[in-house]
Each structure stands twice: as C-alpha cells, then as structure tokens.
Image (tube, grey):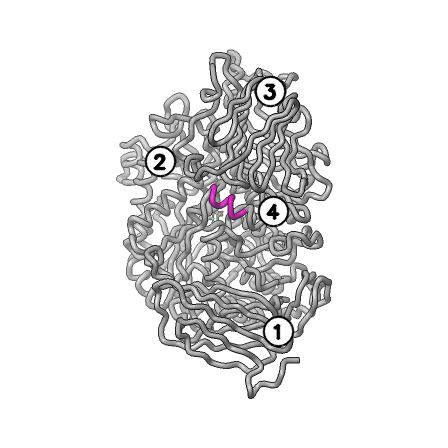
C-alpha cells in the first residue's frame, strides 16, 4: 500500500512504523501576494506556496504549484530540480515564445496568439480561453487543496466534454465519468472495470466541438484523474508528490494536441519494415524444431508472416540472457535458417535476474559485484519471485545499469535475434515462489533507487521501471547492431514510451468482450502518443472459437502491431488451427494487411514526424462531429480507411456510421454519402471496410514476407474526390534514412465535375527506387501505367479510351 506521508515526508511514522490516519483538514490556496514576471512566464506567490506559469509555445503551458518551505525566500527555491530521467523536454529546449501580461485589480491575464490564461487573484485560480472566448480547463473556486496525502486540483467539467487518452485503459472509448489512477501493474485477467494496467500515462484529451485540449500530469509518483466520478460537473487531478506539475496543451484539434504532446514526450522512431508484417507468438514454441515447423507451415500454407517469437522457454531455467542447450542447441543456425526463409526472430527478456550465488551465472555475478540490483531501505538486497524463482531487480534508473543490461543482449543478437520483447517489467513479482499461493507485490516504496548524485525511492519511479528497462534495451540494440533499426516490444511503460518501444496490451482473454475492448484500448493509446500498438490476436488466455479467431484476425490487420499470441496450456492458435474455412479467412486477412504495407509504412512515417496515431478513432479525423465521440467499434487506419469490425458472435451484418463525405465500400466499390448510418453485410469472411473519397491508396503485390516485398510494382488505387497523400519509402531496415536516404512522393487527387485529376509531385529525398511504373487504378475509370520519373506529372481521366465516370 502506498503511504503518502512517507512520500511527501510530511507525516512522521509512529514508533510502530504506522502512519497516522488521513488528517481531516486540507489546506487551500489563498490570494496572490506577489507576482514576478520573467522572460518565460510568471511566478505567483501566495502565503502557502508558489505557482509557476511557463509559456513554452503559443499552445503549450506548464503550471506548477510548490508548497513553499518557510525558509525559502524566493520562488526559485520552491520547485524540485529537473530529474535526469525526466520524460519531458526541458523548458530551456523550447525556443522562447512571445506573450503578453496584463494586470487588473482582480485578475492577471497572460496571452499568446492562441490562448488567454485568466488568473483570479483571490483566491488564485486559473482558466483558459481560446480566441473565440470559449473557456476551458477552468479551476473551480478553492479547487487547489493539499494535505499530507498529496495535492489535488479540481476543474469544471463542461457538459459537452468527452475525455480520451489516459494511456492503456480497458472499457469503451470515452473515459468521462470514472476515476483512473496511474500505477503500473501486472493485471492478468483484466476487464472493463480494471483501473491500473501495465502502462501508466497521465495524459488526457478533452474534446467538444471546435475545441480540444490535453493535460499531461508531469508526475511519476502515484497520481489520479477523477473525470467526473465524484462530481459529474468537475474533474480533478491528484498527485502523491510534493509538487503539482502539469502541462496544458491547446489544440483546437486532437491532431494539434498530439503534435505538441509528442514534441514534449517524444515521437516514435520509424520501425523496421518487417515489424509491420504479421508476427506469430506462443508461450512457447519451446524447441528449435517447433519453431521450424511453425515457420514451414506459414510458407507451405502461403500465409504471409514476418516474425516468430521466442517466449521464456528458450532460456535455461528462465535465466535471462541464456539459451537452453537442449531445446535450442544451435541458436545461430536456427536464426540463419529462419532468416533465409524471410523470418525475423524476437526473443523475450524479463527484468528479474535469478538469484544464484556460486553457480557461475554471469548476469547475476556481474550485477551483484557492481551493486546493480535494487536494495531495501535497510540495505539488504530486495528480492521477489518470478519465473526463475528468487530474483533480483536491476535499477534501470542508473545509466551504468542500463548500459550493462543493454550489452547483455549480445547473447541474443550474436545468435541472430532481431528484436527484443520486454515483459514483466511493471515490474511483476510475487512475494512467494510461483505456484505457492503468493501475491503480486511491489518493490517497497522506500527502496532507494537512482544514481548516487540523484537518489530517490521506488515511490517516485515505480511507474518508470518498464520505460527505463525498454530504454536500456533499445539503446543496447543500437550499440550492438549500429546500422539496424531496433525493434523493442514492451508490456509496461510511462508517458513517452513511444520513443523506445512498441506496446502490446498484455494478457487479454479469448473472449468477444476482449476482442471488442481491444479497439478502444488501442485507440486511446494512440491518443496518448503511443501509436505502435497491438493486442494479442485470438486472445492470450483461454481458447478462441473458430468464429472468434476469424473475426479477431480481421480486426488484427488494423492493429499497428499485428501479433497473434496464446498462453501455455491453451489450444493451438496459429491461423491454420481452426479448420480450413478459418484458415482461408486468416490468409485473406493477412494478405490484405500485406497489400496495405506501403500505405501503412507511410502512416508510421507520418507518426514519427507528427506523433499522429496510426489507428485512429473517428473523432480524430472528424473532431467537430459529436456523433463520432462515442464510437468504440469503428476505427480509421490513417485518414483514408474506415473499418467497422464485427465484435459479436453470429453477426453477419452491422450498422456503420459514415461521417461527412463520400465513402467507397472496399469490397464492392459502392459509394455512400455521409454523414449517415448504413447497414452493411458482414459475412464471416469479410471485414466491413470503406475508403474515403479523394484517397490515394498505395498498395503492394502479395508476398510471403516483407523480405519479399517488391518495390518495382507500385499500385495506386484512386477513389474519386479531393484529397492527397504522401508516400514514404526507404530501405526499410537501416538507419540510412537519418542521413537522407528516404523518398517521399506527394499525390493530389481532384475531382472536377466528371474529370478526375491526379497530380504527382517531384520526388523528395535521396533514396532512389528501382526503375518502375505507377500502376494507377482509379475507381470507375481505366487503369493506366505511368513511368515513375521522379518529376512532377499530371494524369487526367476520362482518358480517350475511358467511358466517363458515372
Ligand atoms: C506474461 C506475458 C505473456 C507471456 C508470458 C510468459 O504473461 O504477458 O505474453 O507469454 O508472460 O512469458
């Protein structure tokens, strides 16, 4: 249990180590006594503490409230120093931005070109206004309170506001009306009512027509958002930390909020192309022979696949950075054979290091010798229990530990492993050996962590454990394979995890509820800056039925990370395990995914540039259409494709909401005009899918894996209407794109009466594609082939041999 007094250092424990009960009195902020302006913003001093308002861009504000120690004689001493592991960009990194300061007897006004901050003097309270005078994110009177259990700030909840993001959350899309805390947890068997899961991302996005803003609570301690649960007209943020520190980001669209939020916390680097292919996992493919059989099955059955995973059984007795000599006697040979067949291999790594003195287990010996493992407050080594039995936990907060851990991955990369899967890094541990009736516990909150010059306790950095392990993993891979793009997958993380790894939603279940829930979960992760995400296709725990599996594979082609996985003891869950009909459905679904790869890869690039989600809720594209605000069972892949997966058994037809514009049925080409609901056939073999009018959709010919993907036959499907698309290409594998070896081609489609005009821009960048022609296929017109000259070109339909489009 958290003991907030311990964190804040405000309440002493009694002789028995017990903390007194929560004090009844909470304090609140008084009137403004002194205002100090500086080049970045202002300090507002009241009797009990100090507010700092920093203006980082015209749409980004950082607000901090620090309790003022009696001895402090100025606001500069009131705030905590920046941590070396801070996930947010330092204030000094933002170029200075101009703002105006105006004072009146009752208020202080700060304004940028986009937002006005109004600050009441007595009591101090903030509200924000956009250029149309719409108020948002306004503190309620006396909304700031604190006690020995932390600091809390209450704000008005606008009746029309819908709330999204919050990281990894079970349940439906809109998060209004509930309370969410931020504390990373292993949560086997989670459901729609679970609170803390594996990721902790204290970021929320508030949306109403014409107005969107985000709030990032800059706090790694335990924190909470109450989004109208206690009082439907208020929302609150609460921290068990000595300071309240948040960023307010004004949009007015979700896209603009995310662009700034990911400038603040980082953007996802471009992954290797192979990581966009289908990935097959199982706990476990437990021998080299089993792995080879699975790989062969994919090729023989002509089901595209890029990645095979090695779960914990490749290790010797679950010791990290070892190979089991019996099951995997020649790992390098196995990897070479798999590579030859166009597969990549990703291996699991857990943080717990088996406690094994005098056993010549070098990871343990080295870690102990260098004092890399977390100790308890009394100085003894802290241990918990995970797969290998008794384990110790490296302190990833220390750069030297990260470096050491990253380099141990050589045991895997030297054998040819291509990517690393970081699991159990909440961290997940039991107080007793597994199978011994123990409980999931945390590392003690008072356990010291961090480098000697920056000591802290686990209470402050629990939420960072997974993120920092993942950082060690990524940085290690970059050193071990200097010119290869790393692929790291993680279960746990914090805000900014997108910089280091892809995320999957942990131990879901083979149930229709979990299939349905996976979509809003991934959509909210995308709205939290984490775009490279997926859920285990088929469900991890339990047994999928053939129908569930078929529907899940169809949904899975939309997941940015498309991975099938299943737990020990469950029935086989490979795409061919459910009979011929389901195998055919899976093959077609995965083939469609591979067809879409050029489009998807461009979306990953866009995400690396702007932080945009790859899989998006409809509201991201249509933020002014309130009809989209509660849609949890439809999603957009980029801005061109709208999918409406089936998430219930027996359903062969479903209602689909089409927002404003023209939408073409992917399967039939039939046009529909939105906004409206339509009823769409959804036979078992078909994912209801629509293309937005004006789309230019780059497609690839079918192939067994991305290693076989051809760049010399680019196929562009054109859907009548007005729109544009930037195709991004590079070698898909190395870091040469960082030095300019990339290519973008801009396409603009215009519909003018019965004419369809495609403009192709000059190719940008230094990556040179093979000699090739664009195969242009406009819906309702004659396809034509056009050499890719890299120069601007224009094509017009109808062509002489083309009947006018009707
Ligand atoms: C955890 C992971 C799961 C993995 C298993 C064994 O439950 O979430 O994906 O298969 O551990 O390593």
- The prevailing secondary structure element of the residues shown in magenta is helix
Dots 3, 1 in contact, CB < 8 A = no
For mark 1, give the secondary structure.
strand
Question: Residue 604, position in %: x, y?
Answer: 47, 57
Q: Does the magenta stretch include residue 262?
A: yes
Dots 1, 2 in contact, CB < 8 A = no
**Mark 2 and mark 4: span between their CA atoms?**
53 Å
**Mark 1 and mark 4: span between their CA atoms?**
31 Å
Residue name at image x 57 percent, y 69 percent: 582
Question: Quick check: can you spot residue 576?
Answer: no
Q: What's drawn in magenta, residue-wise?
A: 258-264
* Residue labelled with disc 4: 252
Residue 661, quarter of the rendered image: bottom right
Position of the N terminus by quadrant: top right
**Mark 1 and mark 2: span between their CA atoms?**
71 Å
Which residue occupies the foreground of this view, 212 or 453?
A: 212
- Is 429 displayed left or right of 137 in the figure? left
Q: Is mark 2 within 8 Å of ligand 1?
A: no
The dot on residue 752 is 1
Question: Residue 476, position in %: x, y?
Answer: 32, 46
**Mark 4 and mark 3: span between their CA atoms?**
30 Å
Position of the C terminus by quadrant: bottom right
Q: Give the foreground label among 3 and 2.
A: 3
Residue 138, quarter of the rendered image: top right
**Mark 3 and mark 2: span between their CA atoms?**
56 Å
Residue name at image x 61 percent, y 27 percent: 108
The dot on residue 355 is 2
Residue 455, quarter of the rendered image: top left
Dots 3, 2 in contact, CB < 8 A = no
């Amino acid at each position: 249990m958290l003991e907030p007094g311990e964190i804040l250092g405000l309440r002493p424990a009694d002789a028995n180590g017990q903390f007194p009960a929560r004090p009844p009195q909470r304090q609140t902020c008084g009137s403004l006594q002194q205002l100090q302006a500086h080049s970045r913003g202002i300090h507002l001093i009241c009797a009990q503490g100090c507010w700092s308002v920093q203006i980082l861009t015209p749409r980004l504000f950082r607000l901090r409230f620090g309790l003022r120690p009696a001895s402090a004689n100025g606001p500069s001493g009131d705030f905590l120093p920046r941590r070396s592991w801070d996930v947010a960009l330092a204030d000094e990194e933002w170029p200075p931005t101009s703002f105006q300061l105006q004072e009146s007897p009752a208020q202080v006004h700060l304004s940028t070109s986009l937002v006005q901050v109004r600050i009441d003097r007595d009591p101090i309270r903030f509200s924000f206004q956009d250029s149309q005078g719409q108020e948002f994110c306004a503190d309620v009177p006396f909304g700031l309170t604190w006690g020995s259990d932390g600091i809390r700030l209450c704000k008005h909840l606008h009746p029309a506001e819908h709330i999204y993001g919050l990281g990894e959350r079970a349940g439906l899309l809109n998060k209004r009306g509930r309370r969410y805390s931020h504390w990373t947890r292993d949560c086997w068997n989670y459901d729609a009512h679970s609170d803390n899961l594996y990721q902790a991302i204290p970021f929320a996005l508030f949306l109403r027509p014409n107005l969107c803003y985000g709030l990032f609570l800059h706090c790694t301690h335990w924190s909470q958002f109450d989004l109208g649960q206690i009082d439907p007209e208020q929302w609150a943020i609460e921290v068990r930390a000595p300071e309240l520190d948040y960023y307010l980001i004004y949009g007015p669209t979700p896209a603009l909020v995310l662009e700034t939020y990911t400038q603040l916390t980082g953007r996802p680097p471009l992954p290797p192309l192979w990581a966009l292919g289908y990935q097959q996992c199982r706990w476990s493919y437990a021998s080299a022979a089993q792995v080879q059989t699975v790989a062969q099955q994919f090729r023989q059955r002509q089901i595209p696949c890029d990645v095979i995973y090695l779960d914990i059984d490749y290790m010797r007795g679950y010791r990290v950075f070892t190979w089991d000599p019996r099951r995997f006697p020649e790992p390098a040979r196995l990897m070479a054979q798999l590579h030859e067949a166009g597969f990549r291999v990703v291996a699991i790594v857990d943080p717990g290091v088996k406690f094994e003195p005098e056993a010549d287990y070098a990871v343990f010996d080295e870690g102990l010798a260098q004092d890399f493992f977390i100790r308890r407050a009394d100085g003894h080594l802290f241990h918990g229990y995970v797969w290998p039995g008794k384990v110790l936990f490296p302190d990833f907060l220390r750069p030297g530990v990260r470096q050491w851990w990253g380099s141990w991955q050589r045991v895997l990369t030297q054998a040819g492993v291509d990517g690393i899967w970081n699991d159990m890094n909440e961290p997940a541990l039991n107080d007793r050996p597994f199978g011994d009736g123990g409980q999931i516990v945390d590392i003690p909150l008072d356990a010291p962590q961090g480098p000697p010059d920056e000591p802290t306790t686990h209470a402050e950095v629990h939420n960072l454990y997974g993120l920092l392990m993942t950082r060690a993993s990524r940085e290690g891979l970059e050193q071990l394979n200097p010119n290869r793009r790393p692929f790291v997958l993680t279960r746990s993380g914090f805000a900014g995890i997108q910089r280091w790894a892809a995320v999957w939603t942990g131990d879901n279940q083979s149930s229709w509820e979990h299939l349905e829930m996976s979509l809003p979960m991934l959509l909210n992760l995308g709205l939290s800056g984490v775009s490279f995400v997926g859920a285990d296709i088929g469900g991890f725990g339990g047994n999928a039925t053939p129908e569930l599996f078929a529907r899940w594979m169809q949904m899975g082609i939309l997941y940015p990370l498309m991975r099938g996985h299943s737990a020990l003891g469950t029935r086989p869950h490979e795409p061919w395990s459910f009979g011929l009909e389901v195998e055919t459905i899976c093959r077609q679904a995965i083939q469609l995914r591979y067809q879409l790869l050029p489009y998807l890869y461009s979306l990953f690039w866009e995400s690396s540039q702007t932080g945009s989600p790859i899989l998006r809720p409809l509201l991201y594209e249509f933020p002014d259409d309130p009809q989209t605000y509660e849609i949890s069972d439809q999603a957009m892949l980029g801005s061109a494709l709208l999918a409406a997966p089936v998430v219930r058994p027996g359903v062969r037809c479903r209602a689909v909401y089409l927002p404003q514009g023209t939408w073409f049925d992917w399967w039939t080409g039939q046009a529909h005009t939105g906004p409206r609901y339509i009823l769409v056939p959804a036979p078992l073999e078909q994912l209801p899918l629509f293309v937005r009018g004006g789309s230019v959709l780059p497609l690839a010919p079918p192939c067994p894996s991305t290693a076989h993907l051809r760049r010399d036959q680019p196929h562009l499907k054109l859907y009548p209407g007005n729109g544009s698309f930037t195709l991004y290409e590079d070698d898909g594998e190395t870091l040469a794109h960082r030095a300019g070896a990339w290519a973008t081609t801009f396409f603009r489609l215009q519909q003018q009466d019965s004419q369809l005009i495609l403009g192709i821009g000059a190719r940008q960048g230094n990556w040179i594609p093979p000699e090739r022609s664009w195969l242009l296929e406009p819906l309702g017109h004659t396809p034509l082939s056009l050499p890719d000259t890299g120069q601007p070109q224009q094509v017009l339909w109808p062509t002489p041999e083309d009947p006018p489009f009707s």
